[in-house]
Image: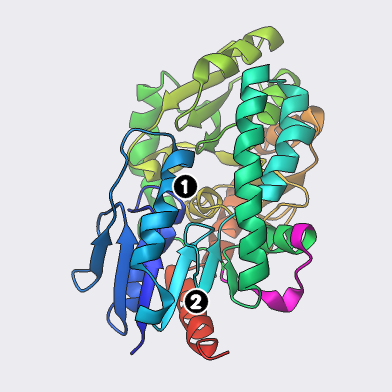
Amino acid sequence: MARIAIGIEDVNRRGGQERVICELLWRLADRHEISLVCFGAEEIPESVRVVRVFDPGRFSLFFRSLWFIVPGSLKARPGRFDAVISQGCNLWRPTHVIAHTCHAQRSHNRRAVQWRQNPPGLLKRLEFAIRDAILLRLERRMARRSRGRIIAVGDDPKQNLIEYYGLSDEDIIVAHNGVDHTVFHPGLREEWRAPICAELGLTEETFVALFLGSRWEEKGLSWVIEALPHVRHEDFRLVVVGSGDADKWTAQAERLGVKEKLTFTGRRPHPERYYAMADCFTFLSETEGLALVTLEAAASGLPLILAEGHAAPGLLEDGVSGFAVPYDPPAIAAKLDALAADPDLCRRAGEASREHSLHFTWDRQAQAIEEFVLRTLDG
């Protein structure tokens, strides 16, 4: 049994990194002495010792994350534990790091792609310049001090960290995210397709492409909206579930003349019901091909349309369980039309998508993390 401290701002089953740690706790708590250093935690094992730090409250996520570093690091000092695991750069002296993303790649993508499509104002540019200066410095320090003990949750963050910080393949292991196949599964479609379509003002004959998540600009929503004018299928709707500036993206759809093909729901509980309602899933992020939402969509039996080069190896088999597409609106639309026009293709791709997803489980990820941490305790 090892004494392990894990530092993360919040733990629950709603977010991305929050859920990863929540699932990890449930699989380690019966074998190790776990201390969770956090602002708050929900749905965790009773045996986990929760060490709370003061939450500054209604500030931005960026400020809360910076604030967490100081009190979190004081409560998770390596001398008190066999291993101290940080979520990204949120502890000063962790023994191991779980990396969900690479800030250097996100910063580059923002300037090279997102701002080219939707240029921000001067104040927004200044805000991001300050944030990037701080985050990149922290990330550079993390990469230098933690090499050999970094755990990436997917291939994209690993390759990005190697590219931007000169790490080697041996410096980072990959422990892929998982999905709960008892919560996300095709059997829900019969129960939820009709009521969710009715809730959104759609017919059951409408072909629904689903986009689910937050940080829409970073996840490629603009590319999907730009594809809508090229979609030829008459009864088609892109449904966007999650929090974001819906007015901004509605304005983009209006400029393109496709507002009627787009529906925003806002954030919704029970995302499994919206996967069950949809016919395919679109996700064109340049920073995380194997996001949790992609795994959930695949487990729900949806064909996937993902970006080339970020297309979730082991999950998306191009032409079989969905399509890898370039950042090109007509090409994206062509694949949406191919699925909409051929129900048998859509069904087969969804079945293959579900089958491929069975490889990705929370048990498998937790085992990989546990074995790696124990193996490198004295390394």
Question: Which SS class for mark 2?
Answer: helix
**In this picture, residue 146 sits left or right of residue 231:** left
x, y percent for residue 316: 67, 56
x, y percent for residue 155: 67, 63
Rendered residue at 67%/29% (across/down)? 224
Report the coloring of the rendering.
rainbow
Q: Mark 1: few, some, or many residues within 10 Å (few <14, many ≥20)?
A: some
x, y percent for residue 125: 67, 26
**In this picture, residue 1 sits left or right of residue 223:** left
Q: Is residue 234 above or below residue 339?
A: above
- Report the front residue among 298 and 204: 298
Q: Mark 2: few, some, or many residues within 10 Å (few <14, many ≥20)?
A: many
Rendered residue at 70%/49% (across/down)? 104
Tag 2: residue type? Ile
Q: Which residues are magenta?
A: 164-175
Quadrant where the N terminus is found in the figure: bottom left
Tag 1: residue type? Leu
- Residue 66 numbered tag: 1
What's the distance in space between the residues labelled 2 and 1, CA to CA? 25 Å
Q: Is residue 202 above or below residue 292?
A: above
Circle 2 is placed at which residue position? 369
Q: Is residue 16 above or below residue 223?
A: below
